[in-house]
Amino acid sequence: MIHQYKLNGYNIVIDVYSGSVHVVDEVAYDIIGMYESESKEAITKFITEKYASDGITEEDVLDCFADIEELKNDGKLFAEDRYKDHAFDFKNRNTTVKALCLHVAHTCNLNCEYCFAAQGKYHGKDAVMSFEVGKAALDFLVKNSGSHVNLEVDFFGGEPLMNFDVVKQLVAYARSIEKDAGKNFRFTLTTNGMLIDDDVIEFANRECHNVVLSLDGRREIHDSSRRDYLGNGSYDKIVPKFKKLVDSRDGKGYYMRGTFTHKNPDFTNDVFHMADLGFTELSMEPVVSPAGTPYALTEDDLSVILDQYEILAKDMLRREKEGKPITFYHYMLDLNHGPCIYKRISGCGSGTEYFAVTPSGDLYPCHQFVGNEEYKMGDVWNGVTKTSLRDEFKLCNVYARRECDDCWAKLYCSGGCAANAFNATGSIRGVYDYGCKLFRKRIECAIMLKAAEADLGLTALDAGQFTDCDSCEECDS
């Protein structure tokens, strides 16, 4: 299977099952598009007639055919799907845990209208995690991590800084055990910024591999949704704090995570606003919300959003040329050393390698399932007790979704987000079609950026192929 598209002056051909990416001229682009459906004679006649004014001869067409056939023989074009028959072996694989999302606070000091977590309470009562529960969670992670050395822990909420003392205690405990356990803890803090102070900054810089900062962009957009319980916007309070924290980290080890809604499908203006504030590590995520709410994305928004992704990619190139580059999370793509094929099929690892832990110690597949009792999988003392559900998540891969069979992007998205699929269809093996359309556009833009960077001499665009790995479940990448 191949996927062809044109963007920003580039003719791009993706070979789905090898992962090879080719940037070609108009003649090769047309021949590749007809290669499997027309005879060589018919293609040659069509191409020589179409490009007669450009001086394209029959010999030129036959030379192009030879190049295409060489790529095909090398497995870099029109490659066969050699992974499908192996996908469902996943049910029998041994799973080990490598990451936890610790919900240290099911409470929040903001009242964001679009919050999927019901203002941080996850449809329950206010709660904070005790040190004892958090300690048991870290012990669970170490005990069940197998040969993984790097263990990821995200302090999440609600607003985790509303339980900052316990966060600090848990990090101190992890540091006290990691050497003897042969592990390396890497911590992330996700915060709305309201409680950032010098103590938080010092702690984050010393202990946190990454800090995720919630900012929706322009003041009017941010304050329309992210308000406190008195109805006051939070922009003016948090932006100076974010600047101070980012400056203290030398602009590294963070990213600004915004949410765009029906109110701002023109979200590139919010990305550009954050960039103009001096923030360079950026993400804007589509809102997760039920259809019909004032902020839910609509079908009318879709064409606007798709255009915005192209606008963003082109502007990123402009900034790169001017020596003021920015990073956009969804365009971070390594064509030569990306995830191995095992990870491309199996997905994010929710419910198998990754769990969310509630303040009471319950285990859920990820933060978006928290509060749905049907998806409670166990607890940090007894481990995963609903093993049938874990088996379901083991099978929750790209080949478990029939809708993905003919999708060119399936080995980039691994079948998509199980939580989004569940929310859209009622099944973790369903497909959130709206999200699929956004994802495909983002991948097209990301690959175009790689082509443009190669033109600028910033990187090499290799026709590299997906890597195989015989022991990916032990991988610490």
Image (cartoon, helix red, strand yellow):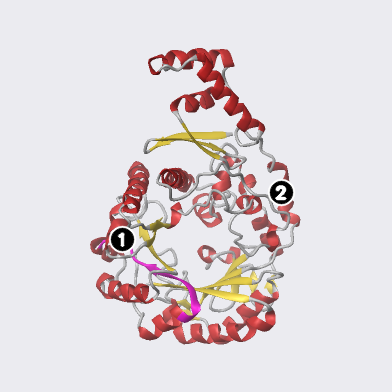
Q: Where is residue 415 in the image (x, y as percent from the top left)?
A: 57, 48
Q: Residue at x 55, y 64 (%)?
A: 366
Gap in Å between the C-alphas at discs 2 and 1? 43 Å
Please tell me whether mark 2 sits on a helix, a strand or a loop.
helix
Location of residue 115 by image quarter:
bottom left
In this picture, residue 373 sits left or right of residue 211:
right
Q: Mark 2 points at which residue?
A: 88
Residue in the picture at 35% in, 53% down: 320
Q: How crowded is mark 1: few (under 14 residues within 10 Å), some or many (20 or more)?
A: some
Image: 8 above or below 104: above
Q: What number is the disc on residue 33?
A: none
Q: Where is mark 1, residue-wise?
A: 275
x and y percent of residue 226 in the render? 31, 67
Q: Which amino acid does label 1 sit on?
A: Ala
Q: What stretch is highlighted in magenta?
A: 206-218
**Image position, residue 54 (x, y; %):** 39, 18
Binning the other alpha carbons within 10 Å of mark 2 as few (below 14), some (14 to 19) or many (20 upward) gives some
In percent of the image, x 65 and y 36: which residue is there? 75
**Of residues 277 and 264, which is closer to you in this image?**
277
Say which amino acid is labelled 2: Phe
On the rendered image, what quadrant is the C terminus found in? Answer: bottom right
Whether residue 174 sits left or right of residue 420 in the image: it is right
Percent coordinates x, y for residue 174 in the rendering:
59, 82
Secondary structure at badge 1 equals helix
